[in-house]
Image (tube, rainbow, N blue to C red):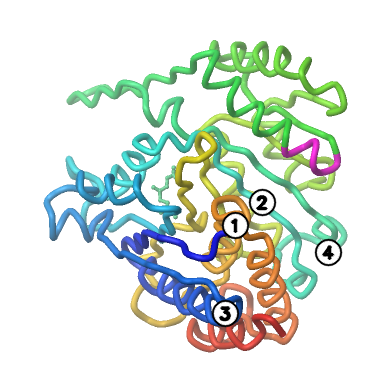
């Protein structure tokens, strides 16, 4: 069991530095409690990097990411760069591509203490436990882009191998859970959707114990808020995965509760980031919800650093803090970032 970890912190923009600052303090407390050593390097990304270094992610930062054990990322995005040629979000996409983190795991589970934070009825939300596996390095986010004066296009390209590798991650995950996988595409209208479905069916032959079904993306969006318990694991492309996981944030009540892990080939560093963005409207006010960043750190210990014991302790501390009423404004509470962070630290190892 490793007891020293080199972590690259990339807080980014908006509330990113606040939530990564909170997660860093929780990590330091976990290091004290479990007796491991944490070596953290911190660098700029997104709008912060454009301003200081002239690009949304520098080559030095990409090299530092490649040589770390894991990357803990905050959020990127800043209205100052809306409509400009260089966008902060390009830094995140460049990192995902450089690290080849092709599988983005986005767990969405109902949290007992937060059932009333969801705008959906209690009976819909109760017991929800879905894992969305989003393909992260292909599709329309990465295809050739044309931005001319009076037309634009985003080319969506998927190769068979890109679908095979993310499908395997999803089948493996389903095999460790309830054994049900739903593949989401638009095979009725898109060529990439038809390739996606054909390849997922081929990969299914390697996993006879996993029950597979296919749902069109628009229908999946409806089922996700009408009957979310019908899903165990969902695998889908980059664009649909981005949208469905944001939609799924209404289930636990707030985007501020959703962590994610972006994984590449075994032995390569993973990129761990909360699903939420930079939320410039509340940045700097000390009210951001740090739970997603803390749960993201928990995913880092489980999927990136092979320390499920630390991950379990962080997840338990978050559950206890929410049950004790440490809720930020987005969850209907009145606690600030600092109060929630201190509560989690208090319950680590308790
Ligand atoms: N922590 C997530 C974040 O910063 N999101 C901003 C963004 O670039 N989103 C697009 C995406 O996740 O593909």
Q: Nearer the viewer, mark 4 or mark 2?
A: 2
Q: Nearer the viewer, mark 4 or mark 3?
A: 3
Asked whether the beta carbons under mark 1 and mark 2 sit within 8 Å of each other, the answer is yes
The crowd level at tag 3 (other Cα within 10 Å; few <14, some 14-19, many 20+) is many
Q: Residue at x 85, y 21 (%)?
A: 208
Depicted 63 relative to depicted 167: above or below: below
Residue picked out by circle 2: 107
- Reply yes or no: does residue 174 show up in magenta: yes
Q: Which mark is residue 9?
A: none
The crowd level at tag 4 (other Cα within 10 Å; few <14, some 14-19, many 20+) is some
Q: Which mark is residue 299?
A: 1
Q: Which residues are magenta?
A: 173-178
Mark 4 to mark 2 CA distance (whole Å)? 19 Å
Depicted 41 relative to depicted 207: above or below: below
Mark positioned earlier in the residue sequence (1 or 3): 1
**Looking at the magenta stretch, what is its main secondary structure?**
helix
Image position, residue 33 (x, y; %): 60, 81
């Amino acid at each position: 069991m490793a007891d020293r970890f080199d972590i690259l912190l990339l807080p980014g923009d908006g509330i990113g530095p606040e939530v990564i600052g909170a997660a860093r303090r929780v990590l330091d407390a976990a290091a004290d409690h479990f007796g491991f050593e944490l070596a953290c390097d911190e660098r700029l990304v997104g709008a912060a990097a454009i301003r200081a270094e002239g690009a949304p992610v520098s080559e030095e930062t990409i090299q530092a990411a490649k040589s770390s054990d894991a990357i803990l990322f905050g959020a990127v995005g800043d209205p100052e760069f809306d409509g400009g040629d260089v966008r902060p979000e390009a830094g995140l996409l460049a990192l995902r591509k450089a690290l080849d983190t092709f599988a983005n795991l986005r767990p969405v589970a109902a949290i007992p203490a937060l059932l009333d934070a969801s705008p959906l009825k209690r009976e819909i939300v109760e017991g929800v436990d879905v894992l969305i596996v989003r393909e992260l390095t292909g599709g329309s986010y990465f295809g050739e882009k044309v931005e001319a004066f009076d037309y634009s296009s985003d080319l969506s390209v998927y190769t068979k191998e890109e679908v095979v590798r993310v499908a395997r991650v999803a089948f493996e995950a389903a095999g460790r859970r309830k054994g049900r996988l739903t593949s989401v595409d638009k095979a009725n209208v898109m060529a990439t959707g038809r390739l996606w479905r054909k390849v997922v069916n081929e990969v299914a032959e390697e996993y006879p114990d996993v029950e597979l079904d296919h749902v069109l993306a628009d229908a999946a969006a409806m089922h996700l808020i009408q009957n979310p318990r019908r899903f165990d694991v969902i695998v889908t492309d980059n664009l649909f995965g981005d949208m469905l996981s944001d939609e799924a944030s209404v289930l636990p009540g707030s985007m501020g509760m959703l962590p994610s892990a972006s994984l590449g080939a075994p032995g390569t560093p993973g990129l761990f980031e909360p699903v939420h963005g930079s939320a410039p409207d509340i940045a700097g006010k000390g009210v951001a919800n740090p739970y997603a960043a803390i749960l993201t750190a928990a995913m880092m210990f489980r999927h990136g650093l092979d320390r499920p014991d630390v991950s379990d302790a962080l997840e338990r501390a978050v559950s206890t803090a929410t049950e004790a009423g440490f809720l930020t404004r987005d969850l209907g509470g009145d606690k600030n970032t600092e109060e929630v962070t201190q509560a989690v630290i208090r319950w680590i190892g308790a």
